[in-house]
């Protein structure tokens, strides 16, 4: 007999930071706009109204602004609180990809904000994606990595396709990791 998969939380069970990750968007956060990017000069970024807890959680996607703030400020994707360097983890075998540098060298990169170890253990119990893959939390290097802009529409944000109107709009950020961490992820995936 196998363990039953975790049930999607019902409305009475929605608690941000516990059954609903801080980083997810809610159906009530459906107003969007454009503003100048604070990090990448000359580019616009998609803005999204912030009203977490309004409506229902969209568990498959991330809120645009919480995603970017989470990466830049190292905020935990589950509870939203800062992760100190010694308690900053990700699930590199569950999410992320390898991106080429101009030199052609591949580096591991991910758009997922970090997690506290305790919050990662909660995700291992409650998050279907993590459970399915048996993902293990791996400490992030203290050096931090490099933030890069992502112009593709994130999952679940397809209705915003018309927003860019031919311009290059930044929807999210991703974090490009060091050569050493990239080798570690490649080893874990073998
Ligand atoms: Zn946390």
Image: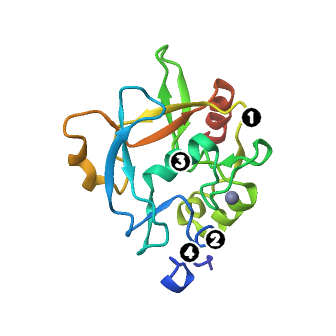
Against 188, is 146 above or below? above
**Side of 139 where 151 appears, left or right:** left
* Residue 11, position as x, y percentages in the image: 49, 83
Of callouts 3 and 1, the N-terminal one: 3
The residue at the point 48 percent across, 29 percent down is 99
Q: Nearer the viewer, mark 4 or mark 3?
A: 3
SS class of the residue under badge 2?
loop
Q: Nearer the viewer, residue 83 or 120?
A: 83
Q: Nearer the viewer, mark 3 or mark 2?
A: 2
Of callouts 2 and 4, the N-terminal one: 4
* Residue 98, position as x, y percentages in the image: 51, 33
Task: Give the quadrant of residue 28.
Answer: bottom left
Q: What is the C-alpha distance between the residues marked 1 and 2?
A: 26 Å
* Quarter containing the N terminus: bottom right
Mark 4 surroundings: few (<14), some (14-19) or many (≥20) residues within 10 A: few
Q: What is the C-alpha distance between the residues marked 2 and 4?
A: 17 Å
Q: Are marks 3 and 1 in contact (CB under 8 Å)?
A: no
SS class of the residue under badge 1?
loop
Q: Are marks 1 and 4 in contact (CB under 8 Å)?
A: no
Say the numbered circle drawn on residue 5.
Answer: 4
The residue at the point 46 percent across, 16 percent down is 102
């Amino acid at each position: 007999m196998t363990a039953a998969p975790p049930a999607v939380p019902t409305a009475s069970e929605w608690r941000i930071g516990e059954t609903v990750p801080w980083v997810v968007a809610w159906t009530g956060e459906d107003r969007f706009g454009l503003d100048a990017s604070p990090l990448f000069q000359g580019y616009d970024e998609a803005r999204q109204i912030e009203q977490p807890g309004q409506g229902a959680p969209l568990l498959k996607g991330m809120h645009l602004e919480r995603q970017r703030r989470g990466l830049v400020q190292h905020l935990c994707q589950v509870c939203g609180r800062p992760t100190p360097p010694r308690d900053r983890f990700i699930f590199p075998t569950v999410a992320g990809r390898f991106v080429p540098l101009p030199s052609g060298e591949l580096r591991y990169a991910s758009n997922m904000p970090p997690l506290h170890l305790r919050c990662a253990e909660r995700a291992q119990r409650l998050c279907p994606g993590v459970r399915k893959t048996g993902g293990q939390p791996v400490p992030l290097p203290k050096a931090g990595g490099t933030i890069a802009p992502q112009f593709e529409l994130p999952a679940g944000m397809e209705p915003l396709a018309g927003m860019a109107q031919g311009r290059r709009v930044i929807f999210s950020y991703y974090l490009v990791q060091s050569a050493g961490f990239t080798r570690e992820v490649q080893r874990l995936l073998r």
